[in-house]
Image (cartoon, helix red, strand yellow):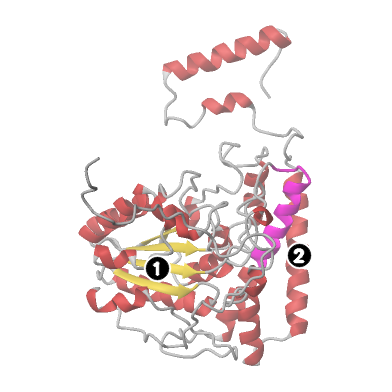
Amino acid sequence: MADHPHGNIAPLRLHVPEPKYRPGDSVDFSDIAVPPVDAISRPDENSPPSPLSALAYGLVRVLDFDHSAKGSWNPGLDADKLRLMLRNMMMLRAFDDRMFRAQRQGKTSFYMKSTGEEATSVAATMALAADDMCFPSYRQQGILIARGYALLKMMNQIYSNRADHLKGRQLPVMYSAPECSFYSVSGNLTTQYPQAVGWAMASAAKGDSRISAVWCGEGSTAEGDFHSALTFAAVYNAPVIMQVVNNQWAISSFSGFAGAERTTFAARAVGYGIAGLRVDGNDPLAVYAAMRWAADRARTNNGPTLIEYFTYRAEGHSTSDDPLAYRAAEEFAKWPMGDPVNRLKAHLIAAGEWDEERHSAQAEELADLIKATQKEAEKNGTLGHGLHHPFESMFDDVFEHQPWHLKEQCEQMLDEQRSKFGADWMPK
């Protein structure tokens, strides 16, 4: 046998990423470096991308461990704005808890909570203009809450009942609210990225002032659509803010499978020549500040920004997932960035602008509001209990003017129903 051409070199080995902790393990996050506030100072929005690369590897922070807001990234929000931010996040958490319970009671088929990630949708949205276009993933219901969308409409959609304006055609939690500049949620991962970039390019092409913002999870950055969108955003200097919610876990695989072991997700911006920020996603003030910086940058023709929110998914991926099967139970409790709701609450109390009594009263008020809204929504029907859209409505709204072949198919279906239930049968 001939000698191996590479001599005594060891054979190649395939690296398979493994999470640090599995169910039953003790958790220790001491290896996560939490830099001091203002370790990376806030640059001018007009800065070119190349000097900003360090921002993609650090961690933008505002709230320090003593609950005070510090550093150049501090957005300087007044107490009223901060209390509204806290209220929106608390409302989102109360809404999630109630709808999760409804799913467990069999009233809807599916739900996804955003516990621990509230700041990445609520605080980010509050930093945008009300008419900036949002392209969410499936865990950004906080956008709608921050923009004052009716909770009743959200619940009707979750129940797919007769009052669901989407007529039961979308999976629960996949909202569509164009009146709130909220693009339809898609279950296909990262399809919203090229759409957001294209929308931003169109806004710039017609000389508008509106920008777009788009969200995805860290696992979705492995999709081709993510990279196609970044290419177009960079080439055409699109006024878009691209956000990656790095909550450490996809449905059952940890972030290493999307490349987290190699570098940060914000570092993808460096290769495309655009600005990138890595942000403490559990610091509502840091999220707001980063989003406002990126929005000002986009609105002044300084191009796109990629933001990574370093956060943690406290609950399962969805009601179809049991995280105890693949990760240690105490991970969220030991997450070094804490809980976004508790951090903002502590900051307001430390500033003398809030107290435990008002916090408890607000929590009770919001729980009552959500409960009353749920009762109203359930009058329109729940899963398996009738009061849904008639099934012949599936032919409606597919085209602006219904073509002949759909009319024909609808009539064939109605004829079959009449033959089954009698000639006098009429659709409800």
Q: Left of 358 or right of it: where is 193?
A: left
Magenta span contains residue 379: no
Quadrant of the snapshot with the N terminus: top left
Q: Amino acid at mark 2?
A: Ala
In this view, the residue farthest toward the front is 1
| Magenta-tinted stretch | 90-108
Q: Amino acid at mark 1?
A: Thr
SS of the residue at dot 1?
loop
Where is residue 29? Give x, y as percent.
57, 75
Where is residue 80? Give x, y as percent.
58, 82
Residue for badge 2: 367
Of the pair 339 and 155, the residue shown nearer to us: 339
Quadrant of the snapshot with the C terminus: top right
Of the pair 208 and 70, the residue shown nearer to us: 70
* Disc 2 to disc 1: CB gap under 8 Å: no
SS of the residue at dot 2?
helix
Identify the residue at image location x=48%, y=45%: 186
Relative to 50, residue 13 above or below: above
Where is residue 111? Give x, y as percent.
65, 49
Residue for badge 1: 264
Identify the residue at image location x=52%, y=48%: 176
